[in-house]
Image (cartoon, helix red, strand yellow):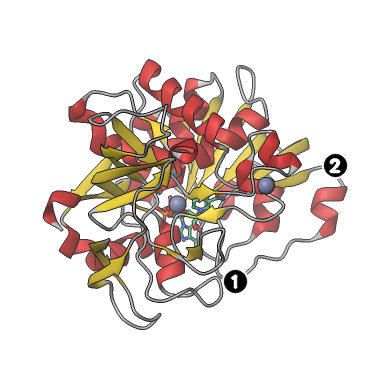
Amino acid sequence: MQVKGYGATSAEVPVAPIVFERREVGPHDIQIDIEYCGVCHSDIHMVRSEWGPSIYPIVPGHEIVGKVVAVGAHVTKFKVGQTAGVGVFVDSCRECPSCQKGQEQYCDENMTATYNDFYRDGKTQTFGGYSANYVIDEKYALHVNFEEKDLARVAPLLCAGITTYSPLRFAGVGKGHKVAVLGLGGLGHMAVKFAASFGAEVTMLSTSPSKEADARSLGAHHFALSTDPKQMEALKGSFDFILNTVAAKHDLNAFCGLLKVEGKMLLVGIPPEDNTFGAATLISKRRSIVGSMIGGIAETQEMLDYCAEHNILSDIEMISMADVNAAYERVIKSDVKYRFVIDMKTL
Ligand code: NAP
Ligand code: ZN
Ligand code: ZN
């Protein structure tokens, strides 16, 4: 089917109206008419080929919430009229050990990304949620059991939410732990909410003095300016975990120095240019750096249900589709409070 969206035809141009071909609803598929789509920093990285060449035209968007409007003959999990979500991937091999464990994001044959990828046939392109609809195998779609009025604030949970929930759970973060969150953007603000909700003592490490009050109202117990050497010196050796969401090159070594003995840096930010770190900082205190990518479908559903139960939602600025390029510029300047969400009615 022909679908209207917003996309880019190369790394050098802004996103603009585009019409693309989406697959028809198959026997195991549902069609979701998109109501809201979050703007993730990964959208910017990929639109601009910052992680290597992207597949053009590219239609970004992997924080998708909308209504089921069609279901294939074999669909059992969803009914027309229900609210459904789509996150960062829409398929995987379904057979490898990771897929069998429900950690499809680590699939041996690689997950199929929601956009900037090809389906398992290797030739049909995926296009994301800056568009009128999405067609997805029901196995990879999420149930969204929230009130209608909250749906725009649910969309960012599909990436920013699960990307921070999963490593905090994997690390067993809870009462008695001192956790720092590095970078108060889309991921960072969800990390603060989750870490506080799990019972940890949370410190926000930010380059933006203007974000202190917000950090505290999101649930941080302390705030420190990461650009102030005095404040950083005072925090040396003090955290069990640091959740690092920074999207630009930074001094990884200095931040690892803030970890206790055996402390762990949980790394989720993916700067276009890799950071370097010195072995001595890790070795001298048996510290480690643990990477983490989004979360599997089962854990994403668990996260959504946790948020519904504990009334955890993203803090958003709603924008019109046509404002997305301006929103990108603000995200790059770290001027986002704390996720832009596109009202897809404005497409
Ligand atoms: P974002 O909204 O832009 O937030 C990043 C924050 O990092 C900024 O708001 C800023 O916070 C801080 N920051 C920016 N430049 C910095 C610098 N030079 N030094 C120190 N701090 C800096 O981005 P996001 O959407 O949260 O995404 C963050 C990163 O995670 C991106 O690289 C994205 O691609 C990646 N990501 C990874 C996964 C995964 O599965 N691992 C999933 C989604 C996204 P302050 O103003 O507080 O300093
Ligand atoms: Zn994302
Ligand atoms: Zn697999």
Q: Which residue is mark 2?
A: 286
Nearer to the camera, 337 or 170: 170
Type of amino acid at the residue the image marks with label 2: Arg
Nearer to the camera, 97 or 36: 97
Q: How many marks?
A: 2
Q: Is mark 2 within 8 Å of ligand 1?
A: no
Which residue is at 64% across, 39% downward? 103
Q: Reading the chain from its start, which is encountered first: label 2 or label 1?
A: 1
Q: Is residue 70 above or below residue 59?
A: above
Residue 178 in the figure: left or right of residue 36: right
> How crowded is the residue under tag 1: few (<14 C-alpha within 10 Å), some, or many (20+)?
few
Which residue is at 57% across, 38% downward? 296
Please give the label number shown on residue 193: none
Which residue is at 59% across, 71% downward? 273
Residue 87 in the figure: left or right of residue 5: right
Whether the residues at callouts 2 and 1 have beta carbons within 8 Å, the answer is: no
Identify the element where label 1 is drawn. Answer: loop
Identify the element where label 2 is drawn. Answer: loop
Please give the label number shown on residue 273: 1
Q: Image quadrant for the C terminus?
A: bottom left
Residue 70 in the figure: left or right of residue 192: left
Q: Is residue 223 visible?
A: no
Q: Residue furthest front?
A: 73
Q: Is mark 1 within 8 Å of ligand 1?
A: no
